[in-house]
Amino acid sequence: MTPFAKKVYQVVLSIPLGQVRSYKWVAQKAGSPGAFQAVGQALKRNPYPLIIPCHRVIRNDEKIGGYALGAKQKKFLLKLEKDLAKCLLSKE
DNA sequence: TGTCCGCGGGTGT
DNA sequence: ACACCCGCGGACA
């Protein structure tokens, strides 16, 4: 586990439910604003793609980009999380 | 070996 | 199909 990747995981794990951040944002929080691609590599090489909400990390223009389990799955998960977040917000 | 940077390809409209 | 950004690959310390 590399320190950079670990920090990336921490940042991704800090993303609230139903919220999404861009690779640039994660890269900046990781300590390297220009290493947004390294973030993707770290997520791809992450030991637990299902544990880390890597699907909350999307492109800077809300595009999908890529996903270890499938870009379409990523969109699906994002839709579910957004709906879930909305449900939680509707509920007091 | 790991991290950072650039070209080409993919997704979205 | 085009434009922008990147889940890739290569080079440097």
Image: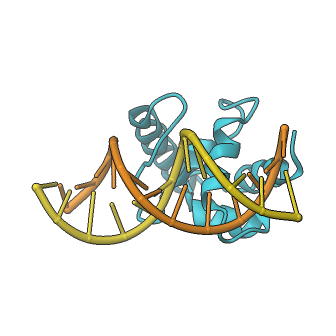
Chain colours: A cyan, B orange, C yellow
Q: Which residue is drawn at 57% across and 49% down?
A: A56
The image quarter in which residue A34 lies: bottom right
Q: Residue at x 70, y 35 (%)?
A: A45
Residue A8: x percent and y percent? 76, 53
- Counting every numbered tag in the picture gives 0
Residue A46's place in the image compared with A34, above or below, is above
Viewer-proximal residue among A88 and A28: A28
The image quarter in which residue A92 lies: bottom right
Residue A90: x percent and y percent? 51, 55
**In this rendering, would A1 be left or right of A36?**
right
Residue B5's place in the image compared with A37, above or below, is below
**In this rendering, would A71 be left or right of C12?**
left
Q: Residue at x 59, y 60 (%)?
A: A23
**In this rendering, would A89 be left or right of A35?**
left
Residue A28: x percent and y percent? 70, 70
Viewer-proximal residue among A61 and A42: A42
Viewer-proximal residue among A20 and A80: A20
Viewer-proximal residue among B5 and A45: B5
Residue B10: x percent and y percent? 33, 41
The image quarter in which residue A1 lies: top right
